[in-house]
Amino acid sequence: MDEMATGGRDGQPQAKRTLKISGGLTISQAGESREKLLAALTGTDELEVDLSALTEVDLSGLQLLCAAHRSAMQLGKRFRLLGDNEVLAKVVADAGFQRHVGCDMDITNSCIWVEERTDG
């Protein structure tokens, strides 16, 4: 997992930060991934997690992303996922995480599992 930050100078909070996750997001990386997600949330108003280089994910990885989103909401911060990733999309679908509306805790209507719809 690599962190690439943008914005903020001289110890000032960053308006936006991007955390790139490459490789696996599985139970074996859960502890390290949790720490990096929490650290990335610190000192920023908006965290974007780039999953374009993700090669492996399991249910614990999905739960970790969900928990990071909830933590961001509780802190009044924005959290979103970036990057199309077939591996992630398959695991999300297989685990039944895809939603049309967020959970009861999603007071900001920003659930990371809600399918984006285009009306046309």
Image (cartoon, grey):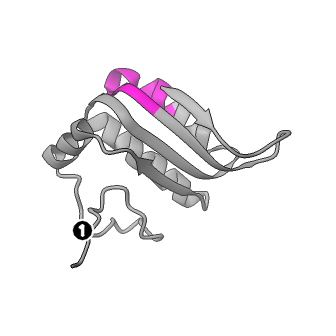
Relative placement, left or right, of 75 versus 64 is: right
Q: Secondary structure at mark 1?
A: loop
Res. 3 image quadrant: top right
The answer to whether any part of residue 39 appears in the image is: no
Residue 62, horizontal then vertical, whole percent: 32, 42
Relative placement, left or right, of 40 versus 13 is: left
Part of the protein shown in magenta: 21-34
Q: State the residue position of label 1.
A: 100
Q: Residue at x 31, y 56 (%)?
A: 113
Amino acid of disc 1: His
Residue 18, horizontal then vertical, whole percent: 56, 42
Res. 95 image quadrant: top left
Residue 19, horizontal then vertical, whole percent: 53, 37
Residue in front for this viewpoint, 77 or 20: 20
Q: Residue furthest right?
A: 10
Res. 9 image quadrant: top right
Residue 107, horizontal then vertical, whole percent: 46, 71
Dot 1, crowdedness within 10 Å: few (<14), some or many (≥20)? few
Q: Residue at x 42, y 47 (%)?
A: 82
Establish if 15 lies above or below 32: below
Q: Residue furthest front?
A: 120
Quarter holding the C terminus is: bottom left
Q: Residue at x 37, y 37 (%)?
A: 52
Q: Residue at x 44, y 32 (%)?
A: 21
Residue in front for this viewpoint, 22 or 68: 22
The answer to whether any part of residue 58 appears in the image is: yes
